[in-house]
Amino acid sequence: MGAVGTARFSTQAHEARRAFVDESARQAYFDDALVRAVAAWGDPPFTVTAAHTGDNKENSGPAAAFAHTSPGMMLQFAIAGLIGAAEILLSERESRALQRLLTTAISRTEILAGHFLAMFVMVFVPFVILIGFGQLFLRVDYLSAPLATLLMAVVTALFVASMGLLIGALVKSPEQAHAFALIPMFVLAGLGGLWVPLEFTGETFRTIGHLTPLAWAMDGFENIVVRGLGLDSVLLAAAVLLAFTVAVFGLAAQRFKFE
């Protein structure tokens, strides 16, 4: 039917430029066009080939169902866990523990670095536990590229720790600690595709989403567990997260007050 339609259109186009002498000439042209159209369909000028990258992780079953929700929920509640970190800083400031630290040989930079390291450990250890749980019980294959998974866990924990330091520097009450942790959690989770993959949204929403760090974190983890890719596929996401970490840490250090 495609060849017949092509021959018909060709005949009509020729007739529009120059009329046929009679109906037999028109039929002869149509027959010739049909033969050439059939031959062209047998050897098309281009073909379409569908291929999957990596190990074709996009399959059905329980593992595929958790491939998005496992890293998404892990990232979301990592930020929620910063409430406790912010409250610790608030408590140390109110009890003047931070000021007493300044009477020791420890510098302000070392105090900031110590709190940052503590927050990093608070985030990274649950990451390791949840990645292990996802691998063993949910069959989400984080260990298909262990170095890539480790890199994403480290840089994501660094970013979340820098957020914790910033929240701790800004809050002045436990209520503010809850608000400053939960509001960014919901906003960044929604925009970053933690609840719904950004592939299912429009181009504008995807562009806005990738202005947030958690969208890049999701890209990195999904490149591993959904697309079956390796270390090279997460380098860009890791670099963007490190850039966010430096910016947020710099802002936290600038706003941090010991009194």
Image (cartoon, rainbow, N blue to C red):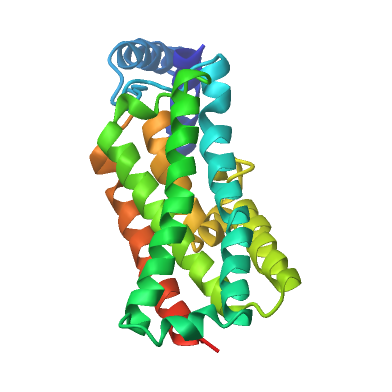
The part of the image, by quadrant, that contains residue 85 is bottom right
Query: Looking at the picture, does residue 186 appear above or below residue 139?
Result: below
Identify the residue at horizontal 35%, vertical 24% (top origin): 52
Where residue 151 appears, as percent x and y from the top left, is 30, 45
Identify the residue at horizontal 39%, vertical 29% (top origin): 142
Any part of residue 157 in sight: yes
Identify the residue at horizontal 48%, vertical 16% (top origin): 2
Where residue 103 appears, as percent x and y from the top left, is 40, 87
Any part of residue 11 in sight: no
- Between 46 and 154, the one lying in front of the other is 154
Where residue 71 appears, as percent x and y from the top left, is 51, 38
- Between 8 and 91, the one lying in front of the other is 91
Q: Quadrant of the C terminus?
A: bottom right
Where residue 169 appears, as percent x and y from the top left, is 55, 78
**Would residue 60 appear left or right of 249 to someone viewing this image?**
right
- Between 89 and 248, the one lying in front of the other is 89
Identify the residue at horizontal 67%, vertical 69% (top origin): 177
Q: Residue furthest right?
A: 175
- Between 38 and 60, the one lying in front of the other is 60
Query: Looking at the picture, does residue 142 appear above or below residue 151?
Result: above
Query: Looking at the picture, does residue 11 appear above or below residue 258?
Result: above
